[in-house]
Image (tube, grey):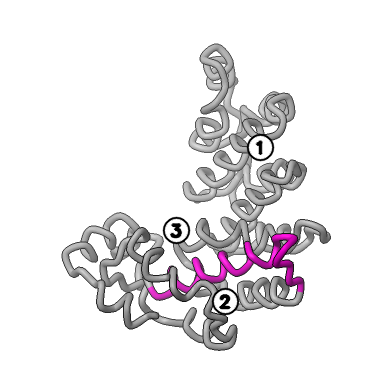
Amino acid sequence: MLAEVDAAADPAAAVLLARYFKLGPGEYGHGDRMIGVKLTTIRGILKPYLRAGLPLADLEQALTSPIHEHRLTILCLLADRATQALKPRTANPAELRALYEIYLRSTAYINNWDLVDCSAPQVVGGYLLDKPRDPLYVLVRSKSLWERRIALVATQYLINQGQTADTYKLSAEVLGDREDLIHKASGWMLREAGKRVDEAELRAFLDRYAGRMPRTMLRYAIERLDPDSRKHYLAVPRVAAGNR
């Protein structure tokens, strides 16, 4: 499977992707290696392997690859397997737990926003749907930018099931975070919670925290509100939120 990914490599695309995913010195993705395979191509390569039952031990080992697109391929596959394990007709609690445990052991290799976003909702959020959410609060207090993003983006699955409490609690935890990628993730999840579940809940959160929210988080969160509401929340006086 990964040999097929290698065969699709495009050096010119790799240069562009390295810029897009900030792999330069001092940037958040520095040290990663791109070979130039887009997600749409990876999803096409994956299709024959989705139901092949590839051994989880082999998939976990492959997550240590230095090549970004290898890890992206594996994480998309883990997300698909988690989705299948969550469906009533193909429910497999043991596999779901194994996928979740692999994921948490491998967070050092889930080190860019695309890797998090393609997998955290299904693997982490899906597993925790009917369980205590304590692991999300451990992750959101991590020094790792990517573990904090995993905690936030994992709640997308919970939101889709009508559960928003953790999205709001976790978003309150990161009000003082310095990382723009955390502001974006939190604002994105807040917007989804308001759009898909209850706009009144979102407004209540904004009424309490708008003045403390980083500007990017606030703009993402209010994106689906009416123009007058957006103007109102953007005009709320700023208050220091502290720093992580």
Query: Residue flagged by tag 1: what amino acid is it?
Result: Ala
| Residue 21 horizontal/vertical position (percent) | 35, 58
Question: How dense is the environment of label 3, judged by Cα within 10 Å: few (below 14), some, or many (20 and up)?
Answer: some
Please identify the dominant SS of the magenta region.
helix
Q: Tell which circle, 3 or 1, labels the residue nearer the N-terminal end.
A: 3
Report which residue position mark 1 lands on: 193
Image quadrant containing the N terminus = bottom left
Q: Position of residue 140 (x, y in %)?
A: 66, 57
- Magenta segment boundaries in residue numbering: 70-93
Q: Secondary structure at mark 1?
A: helix
Q: Is residue 138 visible?
A: no
Residue at numbered disc 2: 106
Could you tell me residue 158's position as x and y percent?
71, 49
* Earlier sequence position, callout 3 versus callout 2: 2
- 70 to 20, vertically: above or below: below
Say left or right for 23 vs 102.
left
Give amino acid for label 3.
Asp
Residue 97 picture quarter: bottom right
What residue does disc 3 label?
Answer: 114
Give the farthest residue toward the top: 228
Q: In this orientation, which residue lies closer to the viewer: 197 or 212?
A: 197
Q: Is residue 183 above or below residue 111?
A: above
Amino acid marked by disc 2: Ser
In this view, the mark in front (1 or 2) = 1
Query: In which image quadrant can residue 104 be found?
Result: bottom right
| Label 1 or label 2, whichever comes before in sequence order | 2
Whole-number angstrom distance, CA of label 3 to CA of label 1: 21 Å
Question: What SS does tag 2 mark?
Answer: loop
